Image: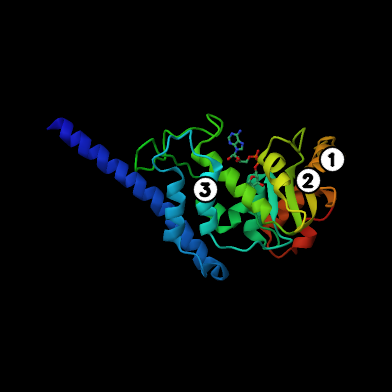
Amino acid sequence: IVVVVIAIICGVTAQNKLHSFRKVVMERCEEYLQKNSHVTRNNDCKIIWAAFEQAYIGKDSCDVSPEAYDPLIRSVKQDAVCNSMLFWSKTKQMAHAFTAKRNCLATLEDTLLGFMFDDLTWCSKNKSKETFTTGCPGWSDCQNNPVRSFWLKASINFAATACGNVSVMLNGSLETPFSNSSIFGSVEVKNLDPNKVKGLTVLLVTKDTDVTTCRHPSFQNLQTSLNPNFSYNCREVPYSRVEGCISDPEIPCRSCLKER
Ligand code: AVW
């Protein structure tokens, strides 16, 4: 009897976890569509969820390829907004705090797809029908884990659909502000489409005490990876100004992001 009771409790707990994860994702989807009525048309959260699930359910948690998310990508209907796409690397918190207050720029996590899954963890198991949110592989534990493959695919798609002038927010407090091995450097830069993208502007957010500038040698690597037809700009933007713009939404976007 004890064994049966424990088995039932475990089963119910697992079911609740699945439902709470699905619930979080579905609520985010509905919330996004409610707040962004221009995206609502053509998107169905249930269809998106089904396409998401098929990518990793029943698979070993180290055997989910980025391509497994292709149907998910196809299920989300949202047009890129040219000239407003913001990439980021080692500046996640600041980039998101900024775009939360300003419509002039938007990150992957401000799109429906990124918004639904930001900061979540999920995986399944070989032959299982369940979704787990604990005991999943960490980012670097194995290459083809469900979360890493998702962000790779989502990043490829975000970059490949980018158009006009794109921007990237980089961290001027780091010794090396651009890394070829980051998702931005290894995936997004390489997937920008020369038929659609005009140029890239680096917004190097720097504090007064920082020594890193736009002349840093790592930006040579960035320019080398870029299509030669793209224009390239780098602006040192004071951290204090970005912070000021995050707390005061009245300041126009242009003055927030101008050169020091
Ligand atoms: P990031 P990226 N271990 O700030 O350019 C654990 O370096 O890579 O910026 N988590 C990791 C690791 C790792 N080694 N590497 C990356 N991550 C996860 C999508 C972690 O969640 C957007 F469009 C970390 O917060 C940006 O333009 C996040 O990836 C671009 O990719 C970013 O690491 C940022 O990727």
The kind of secondary structure element at disc 2 is strand
Q: Is residue 260 visible?
A: no
Circles 1 and 2: CB atoms closer than 8 Å: yes
Task: Identify the amino acid type marked 3.
Answer: Tyr
The residue indicated by pointer 3 is 69
The kind of secondary structure element at disc 1 is loop
Residue at horizontal 37%, vertical 49%? 20
| Other-residue count near label 2 (Cα within 10 Å), few / some / many at <14 / 14–19 / ≥20 | many
The residue indicated by pointer 2 is 204
Front position among marks 3 and 1: 3
Residue at horizontal 51%, vertical 41%? 147
Cα separation between marks 1 and 2:
8 Å
Q: Nearer the viewer, residue 9 or 254?
A: 9
Q: Nearer the viewer, residue 161 or 32?
A: 161
Q: Position of residue 244 (x, y in %)?
A: 72, 55
Question: Relative to 208, is 166 above or below?
Answer: below
